Amino acid sequence: MATANHPIEPSLRENAMQYNKTVHIGENVWIGAGTIIVPGVTIGKD
């Protein structure tokens, strides 16, 4: 699970403008091996 991200635009990346977003994972959720969960995602319950 990765919560860090960076801008796509090269001029913004040059300034090391990294940012984080919250990941919400609900109750009773199964996350399989190899799953990629990206920043800002909410996975509902059940």
Image (cartoon, rainbow, N blue to C red):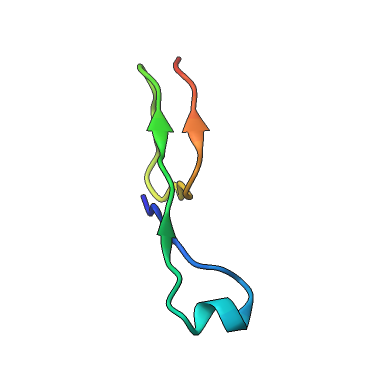
x and y percentages locating residue 2 in the rendered image: 38, 54
Q: Residue at x 49, y 22 (%)?
A: 44
Q: Residue at x 36, y 17 (%)?
A: 28
Q: Nearer the viewer, residue 11 or 30?
A: 11
Q: Nearer the viewer, residue 27 or 22?
A: 22
Query: Which quadrant, please, contains the C terminus?
Result: top left
Residue pushed farthest right? Answer: 9
Check the image and report above or below for 42 versus 46: below
x and y percentages locating residue 23 in the rendered image: 41, 39
Asked whether, in this view, residue 38 is left or right of residue 28, the answer is right
How many badges with numbers are in the image? 0
Asked whether, in this view, residue 33 is left or right of residue 46, the answer is left
Q: Residue at x 40, y 41 (%)?
A: 22
Q: Quadrant of residue 16?
A: bottom left
Q: Nearer the viewer, residue 36 or 14?
A: 14
x and y percentages locating residue 33 in the rendered image: 37, 45
